[in-house]
Image (spheres, grey):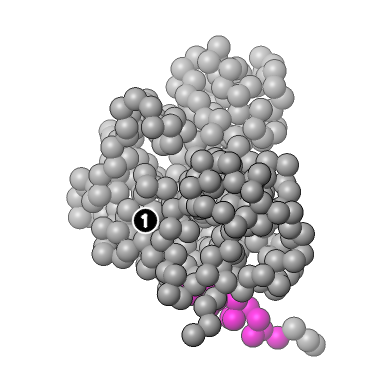
Amino acid sequence: MYKKRIGIIFGGRSAEHDVSLKSAAAVIRNLNSDKFVPVYIGINRRGEWKRFGGSVDLIEKGIWETHAAHLNAEELKDIIDFALPILHGPYGEDGKIQGFLETLGIPYGGCGVLASAVCMDKQMFKDVLRHKGFPVVRSMCLTCQKDPDESVLDKIEEELGFPCFVKPANMGSSVGISKAADRRQLACALRLAASYDSRVVIEEFVQCRELETAVMGNVDPEASEVGEIIPSAEFYDYEAKYSGCGRPSELHIPAGITDGDRKQIRRLAVEVYKAACCSGYARVDFFKDKTTGKIYINEINTIPGFTDKSMFPLLWGSYGVSFPKIIERIIELGYERYHAENNRQTEL
């Protein structure tokens, strides 16, 4: 039986490079070797493509590059049948890689160009959801310099008040996110976020529970069980997610919520997944206001983490779907979308 060559694309130019390595290593270890042959394709921090043939452990430890050979990205079509981008953040999760693979005619797993771009940009995503009537917290977006002037601070204080959250518009894994309780902290938070992205999103603070569900599918997507994150820090920041230092955050699956909330979250997850034109798979994150009980959509992560601490495989695992089966399903869905798109009329 011919085994499909699955190109696992990892690394990348974003600040989430290291997270990508851990996710890719987990995916490689769980790829069904009876059906698939993994091809390791790394992108270093300079954006150079490399083909790696060594141990998965070297990928996870971040020392793979010295053992890799240069690869012209255009050669991809000759060495893989299908691509699985495991790239977090800009240059991987924002539609750029997806568009490149489409120009080469290579089928791939996960969301397409449009959904990837919309979901990566936090403010654009919120604007789309507001237009469609979905519940999201109040926010504003600024093109921010590294030294914000007083008028910027005035505008944020007047419209959103304190405390508030400050985030780079195009970054994941909670990179560059801060909570600001006053003007001094706000100025610092804006400078930090602006060091990652010229566009900065400021959100109102809601005392909330953080809930997540995983979705898989194309035309008929399904939502997993709902899980809850109880951060070890004040909020679920990068350190709480990945550092392994200090007290770990708690992941509760299933979340301790009512059946009504669970049904609402799973329904909203599927609806917003469709509204954002998602396909393949994604993780949908929610806030539940501790005071009012209102549920808000926070974001869609189109390439969620696949580490041993990541919610996506854990949520489906609670439904009895093993890690290898998750990957196999993602590949099936990628081929399904590829064939559907290539059967469309292309001539007048």
Q: Nearer the viewer, residue 236 or 33?
A: 33
Q: Quadrant of residue 45?
A: top right
Task: Check residue 116 for magenta coloring.
Answer: no
Residue under pointer 1: 313
Q: Residue furthest top?
A: 184
Whole-percent x and y of residue 33? 44, 70
342 drawn magenta: yes
Please determine whether, in this image, residue 60 is positioned above or below residue 36: above
Percent x, y of residue 54: 56, 54
Residue at screen point 49% across, 36% down: 174
Residue 248 in view (yes/no): yes
Could you tell me if residue 279 is visible in this image? Answer: no
Q: Secondary structure at mark 1?
A: helix
Q: Position of residue 192 (x, y in %)?
A: 60, 24
Horizontal and vertical percent position of residue 245:
38, 27
Res 211 → quadrant: top left
Tell me which residue sits at (66%, 14%) in the image: 150
Q: Give the farthest residue toward the right.
A: 348
Q: Quick check: 278 above or below 10?
A: below
Q: Is residue 78 above or below residue 189?
A: below
Residue range of the region highlighted in magenta in the rendering: 332-345
Which residue: 56% across, 30% down?
Answer: 176
Q: Residues within 10 Å of mark 1 (few under 14, many from 20)?
A: many
By secondary structure, the bulk of the magenta-drawn segment is best described as: helix
Residue at 55% of width from left, 19% of height from top? Answer: 186
State which quarter of the image contains the C terminus: bottom right
Q: Is residue 333 left or right of residue 293?
A: right
- Quadrant hosting residue 89: top right
Q: Amino acid at mark 1?
A: Pro
